Image: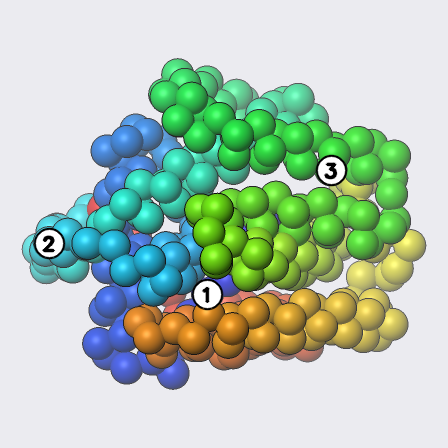
Amino acid sequence: MFGYVKINKMDLTFREYEYYKSYYCGLCKTLKKNHGEVSRFSLNYDITFLIVLLSAIYNPESEITEEVCIANPIKKKKVQKNEITEYAAAMNVLLAYFKLKDNVKDERRIKDKIAYNMYKGSLKDTKNKYKYKAEYIEKCLYELEVLEAEDSIDLDDVSNTFGKLMGEIFAYKKDEYEEILRNIGFNIGKYVYILDAYEDLPEDIEKNRYNPFKEYKPKSEELKKKVDRIISMSLGMLGRNIDMLNLKRNVGIIENIIYSGVYLRYKNILYGDGKDKNGDVSHIN
């Protein structure tokens, strides 16, 4: 369900792109260190954006190093970590764990069972440290499960539930930024859920799986207009809340993601060939 909150590499300066990659690599390294090798397969851009945004707001002291990775064992890359990275890695793992738990119950694939059991063994400390967050995430995913079991076609019900989940993850602290960050997370979650449902519709119909758009034909013009309208509204509210933060750091990266990367991603899925043209920094460190 993740991977929709990405940069537009072509619109970033070289320095901005390198800085963004350093956050991404920091998340990857932290996942490995704190949660084991398998956790790095859940690495995603949406949580990288969380680090970029929260780091811009709270300006934590960061450790920047140069390290090699498996993808390129010769050339060193910048790796940036801070307290936000630790938090984001924990949220990344909680999301992956509960998703795998759901997959094991619903689809019973061997690879999901193996990954789930590997996560399960190293997750106790994370759930204890972020007990409220873990319980809230699980509660929202259970509510989604119920709605999906009922074959709900109420798009607001299902997308708002995932929006609340992401809102809780973005609300890092109970402070003056909490409400704005909760709204940002909510609109990102709504956007991600709706676009994922739209993109998965042909396969979900073929495999007789739940999808809130099941009453529409895949790629129909009516569905495209509906999805375009709802996502445009969510991204508009997202942009307004970002502007309310009056950020002074990581501004170029954040604006690139919100006003270019995300926009191109969803427009390409709706009206293009569906292939990602935003640029990719994927690798395993």
Residue type at numbered disc 1: Lys
Q: Secondary structure at mark 2?
A: strand
Query: Within 10 angstroms of label 1, few (less than 14), some, or many (20 or more) residues?
Result: many
Q: In terms of sequence position, does the residue under pointer 3 or pointer 1 come before the other?
A: 1
Q: Which x, y percent locates residue 111?
A: 50, 27
Residue pointed to by mark 3: 144
Residue pointed to by mark 1: 6
Quadrant of the rendered image containing residue 227 = bottom right
Residue pointed to by mark 2: 65
Label annotation for residue 31? none
* Rendered position, 198 above or below 34: below
Camera-near label (2 vs 1) is 2
Q: Which x, y percent locates residue 4?
A: 54, 60
* Rendered position, 170 above or below 220: above
Residue type at numbered disc 3: Leu
In the rendered structure, the answer to whether residue 5 lies left or right of residue 186 reads: left
Residue type at numbered disc 2: Thr
In the rendered structure, the answer to whether residue 211 lies left or right of residue 140 reads: right
In the rendered structure, the answer to whether residue 1 lies left or right of residue 271 reads: left
* Rendered position, 187 above or below 175: below
Q: Residue furthest front?
A: 176
Residue positioned 60% across, 33% down in the render: 136
- How far apart in space, not on screen, are marks 2 and 1 (Cα)? 24 Å
> Mark 3 and mark 2 in contact (Cβ < 8 Å)?
no
Q: In terms of sequence position, does the residue under pointer 2 or pointer 1 come before the other?
A: 1
Q: Secondary structure at mark 1?
A: loop
Question: Which residue occupies the foreground of this view, 142 or 173?
Answer: 173
Q: Secondary structure at mark 3?
A: helix
Question: Which residue occupies the foreground of this view, 88 or 223?
Answer: 88
- How far apart in space, not on screen, are marks 3 and 1 (Cα)? 25 Å
